[in-house]
Image (cartoon, rainbow, N blue to C red):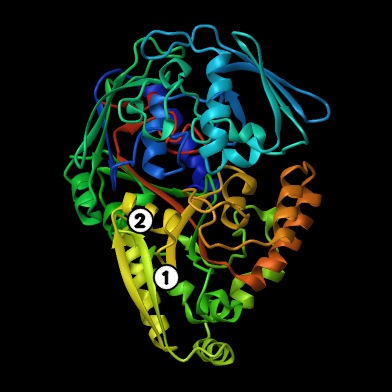
């Protein structure tokens, strides 16, 4: 049965059903969970990347100071408790004293300080903005960490999870280059599962950590199957070779068939808002002209993309920051109103810009089936206004290099989650950054006024004041259009119906140690 998480009656029914299942059967230990991935991670060091597959695997190997429950509230993980100063500038964390790395060494404040200063700060696409505000990180004893900020940073607690601030072992990484360290491929974490093997192009295997500081996992092992073809992923789920597929790897066209399958559970809802968008290489040529970018927005039928590429699992009524955070959404800068599908208007803007013919490269992750369908729709849309679009499907690691390192693209379809706050997930789309950092602004766009507004929003705790800052930033971005926001995602997950304990955390990839098999 399809469950839609955004509707209260259905959510209540799901909770009642979960309660009846729990009363009928207590969690059981044993067995394996096979999860589908669309591509190999580039590595297994999530301090260096916000890549989806690296985060998916890393969430079960490593730990953060906190984890976020399904409502987004921080819960103790490596930090058993914490205090925040009245001025919002000093955070004191008290670490558990029973946490151990998988090699038996204790997890200490030195590991936290080392990870933040040497790995997260320099390399992590979302953490680096918070790191820039840090005045210092103190480790007064082995189990106390103090973060001192120059100014308040509203979403800091939401950032300290295994996805945005995973803690890595100092004794393993100290003295080496984290970018090419052997431990990136043979990781040592402190999480509920221990790394066992990685057969590239086939599988990554993790096994239960019997010495985990929290309750040991119910499952014996996690197996991440690498299945690049979206049709093959769907078939693998239906015949029982795979037990779980997250929406990012789900073939949307197969969703109705899966909903009708009595052996599968299909869940849809909004946990962490996620934007689907096109990076535009604004550095030179026709795309450096905002009028051309505005023409593209008028030429692209975003509703068609949602209906045909996403099978309706999206909302095209969005602005520069989507619509997932109601307080940060401004109807005045909704792209469905500012840039409705209008090929005639697109042609007029191109004429005003002096563009008579144009060929663009559309680069995307070849493992993302909906991206291919969206690209085909956009190619047909742009053909109507005289633009030739060349689709360039690339294996994920090659795509990352092409877009973020080499800037060898014109348009690139991407999807970013908000990580629980627009500061964490969406600021990196627009803020000025040095070129070459994966999963941040790849457009070359830089606007000091936007940078200042977003920086101020990051340090503002009052939601009304933050909303006004986002309104001002959105007003500029809606005219400059360095990024073509297409739609907000409606998240989907399909699993074997016997699986219990899914979605305990805000991010569906987290807390897989609480998953178990019903009889």
| Percent coordinates x, y for residue 392 in the rendering | 31, 67
Q: Is residue 161 above or below residue 220?
A: below
Q: Which residue is mark 2?
A: 399
Q: Residue 305: which disc?
A: 1
168 over 284 or under it: above or below? above
- Location of the C terminus by quadrant is top left
Disc 1 packing (10 Å; few <14; some 14–19; many ≥20): many
Front in this rendered view, residue 248 or 403: 403
Residue 175 drawn above or below residue 312? above
Note whether 182 is above or below 287 in the view shown.
Answer: above
* Label 2 secondary element: helix
Q: Residues within 10 Å of mark 2 (few under 14, many from 20)?
A: many
Inter-mark Cα distance, 1 to 2: 21 Å
Q: Quadrant of residue 411?
A: bottom left
What residue do we see at 54% from left, 22% from top? 114
Q: Measuring from the top left, give residue 518's x and y in whole percent.
A: 29, 27
Residue shown at 59%/42% (left/top)?
Answer: 420
Q: Is residue 308 visible?
A: no
Query: Residue 447 falls in which quadrant of the image?
Result: bottom right
The image shows residue 398 at horizontal and vertical percentages of 32, 53
Q: Residue at x 22, y 56 (%)?
A: 231
């Amino acid at each position: 049965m399809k469950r839609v998480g955004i509707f209260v009656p259905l959510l209540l029914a799901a909770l009642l059903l979960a309660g009846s299942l729990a009363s009928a059967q207590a969690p059981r230990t044993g067995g394996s969970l096979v999860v589908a991935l669309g591509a190999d991670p580039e590595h297994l060091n999530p301090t260096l990347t916000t890549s989806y597959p690296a985060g998916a695997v890393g969430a079960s190997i490593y730990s953060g100071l906190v984890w976020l429950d399904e409502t987004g509230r921080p819960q103790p993980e490596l930090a058993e408790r914490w205090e925040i100063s009245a001025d919002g500038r000093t955070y004191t964390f008290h670490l558990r004293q029973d946490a151990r790395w998988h090699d038996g060494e204790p997890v200490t404040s030195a590991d936290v300080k080392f990870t933040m200063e040497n790995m997260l700060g320099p390399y992590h696409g979302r953490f680096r903005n918070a790191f820039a505000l840090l005045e210092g990180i103190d480790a007064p004893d082995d189990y106390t960490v103090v973060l001192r900020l120059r100014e308040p940073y509203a979403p800091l607690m939401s950032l300290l999870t295994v996805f945005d601030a995973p803690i890595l072992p100092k004794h393993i990484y100290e003295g080496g280059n984290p970018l090419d360290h052997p431990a990136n491929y043979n990781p040592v974490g402190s999480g509920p599962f221990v790394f066992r093997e990685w057969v590239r192009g086939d599988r990554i295997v993790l096994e239960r950590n019997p010495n985990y500081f929290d309750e040991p996992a119910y499952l014996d092992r996690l197996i991440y199957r690498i299945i690049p073809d979206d049709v093959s992923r769907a078939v693998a789920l239906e015949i029982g070779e795979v037990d779980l597929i997250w929406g990012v790897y789900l073939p949307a066209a197969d969703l109705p068939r899966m909903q009708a399958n009595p052996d599968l559970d299909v869940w849809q809802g909004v946990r962490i808002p996620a934007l689907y968008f096109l990076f535009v290489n604004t550095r030179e040529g026709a795309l450096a002209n905002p009028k051309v970018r505005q023409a593209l927005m008028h030429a692209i039928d975003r509703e068609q993309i949602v209906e045909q590429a996403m099978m309706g699992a999206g909302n095209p009524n969005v602005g520069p920051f989507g619509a997932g955070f109601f307080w940060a959404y401004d109807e005045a800068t909704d792209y469905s109103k500012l840039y409705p599908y209008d090929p005639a208007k697109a042609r007029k803007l191109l004429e005003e810009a002096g563009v008579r013919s144009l060929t663009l490269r559309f680069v995307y992750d070849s493992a993302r089936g909906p991206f291919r369908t969206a690209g085909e729709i956009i190619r047909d849309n742009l053909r109507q206004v005289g633009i030739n679009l060349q689709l360039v499907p690339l294996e994920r690691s090659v795509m990352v290099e092409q877009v973020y390192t080499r800037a060898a693209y014109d348009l690139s379809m991407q999807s970013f989650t908000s990580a629980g706050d627009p500061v964490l997930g969406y600021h990196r789309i627009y803020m000025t950054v040095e070129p070459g950092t994966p999963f941040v602004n790849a457009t070359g766009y830089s606007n000091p006024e936007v940078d200042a507004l977003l920086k101020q929003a990051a340090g503002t705790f009052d939601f009304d004041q933050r909303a006004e800052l986002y309104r001002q930033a959105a007003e500029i971005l809606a005219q400059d259009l360095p990024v073509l926001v297409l739609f907000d995602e409606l998240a989907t997950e399909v699993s074997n119906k016997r699986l219990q304990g899914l979605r305990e955390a805000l991010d569906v990839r987290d807390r897989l140690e609480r998953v178990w098999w019903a009889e």
